[in-house]
Image: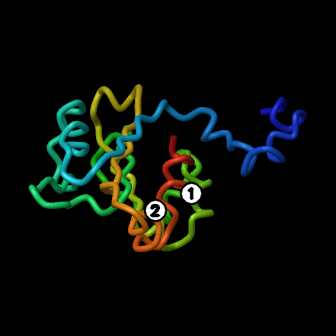
């Protein structure tokens, strides 16, 4: 972190990284069209069979969901997730309440999650719908999470 401050990292990037962001587990961000199996892949890799995974033939995931390790299953809503110092998501607050209402953290006790975090995303929309109808900038959020 001192090198970030010495090199004026915050001048060239949106903000200086927080300690929780620097110490976070690696994240895998899954992006793709609706109903291509992003949520199913996370479910299969982690071995988690949670009611919080909504898998149907039609588009069903309408939010970003970080799947992280913890002792017991729980869901943390976006606004709360940005305030918890143990989670590396405080920087997401810059995307506003429209985005935070569509962001959740799913805490699960899966062995693989001790090493890596998965980010499930809503399906990619075509054309201007991607930017306009969501209420937040999908691409900027994806860049931040990546």
Q: Assign a secondary structure to mark 2.
A: helix
Label 2: how many residues lie within 10 Å, few (<14), some (14-19) or many (20+)?
many
Q: Nearer the viewer, residue 57 or 85?
A: 57
The residue located at (60%, 32%) in the rendering is 23
- Determine whether 80 is above or below 37 in the image: below
From the viewer's perspective, tell me whether residue 105 is left or right of residue 37.
Answer: right
Please provide percent x and percent y for residue 61.
25, 58
Please provide percent x and percent y for residue 78.
46, 62
Residue 127 marker: none
From the viewer's perspective, tell me whether residue 3 is left or right of residue 53.
Answer: right
- Determine whether 123 is above or below 71 in the image: below
Q: Nearer the viewer, residue 132 or 14?
A: 132
Residue at the spot of label 1: 92
User: Could you say which quadrant of the image residue 62 lies in?
Assistant: bottom left
- Determine whether 131 is above or below 55 in the image: below
Residue 78 marker: 2
Please provide percent x and percent y for residue 33.
27, 50
The residue located at (55%, 55%) in the rendering is 140
The image quadrant where one finds the N terminus is top right
User: Could you say which quadrant of the image residue 91 lies in?
Assistant: bottom right
From the viewer's perspective, tell me whether residue 10 is left or right of residue 116.
Answer: right
- Determine whether 13 is above or below 46 in the image: below
Q: Earlier in the sequence, mark 2 or mark 1?
A: 2
Task: Tell which tag, 2 or 1, sits nearer the viewer.
Answer: 1
From the viewer's perspective, tell me whether residue 80 is left or right of residue 133.
Answer: right
Q: Which of 64 and 125 is in front in this view?
A: 125
């Amino acid at each position: 972190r001192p090198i970030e401050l010495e090199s004026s990292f915050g001048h060239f990037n949106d903000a200086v990284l927080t300690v929780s962001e620097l110490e976070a587990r690696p994240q895998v961000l899954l992006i793709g069209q609706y109903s291509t199996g992003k949520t199913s892949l996370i479910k299969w890799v982690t071995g988690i069979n949670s009611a919080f995974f909504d898998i149907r033939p039609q588009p069903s995931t309408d939010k970003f969901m970080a799947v992280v390790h913890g002792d017991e299953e729980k869901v943390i809503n976006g606004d709360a997730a940005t305030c918890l110092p143990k989670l590396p998501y405080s920087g997401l607050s810059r995307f506003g309440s429209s985005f935070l209402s569509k962001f959740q953290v799913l805490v699960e006790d899966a062995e693989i999650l001790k090493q890596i975090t998965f980010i499930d995303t809503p399906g990619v929309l075509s054309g201007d719908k991607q930017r306009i109808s969501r209420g937040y900038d999908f691409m900027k959020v994806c860049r931040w999470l990546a």
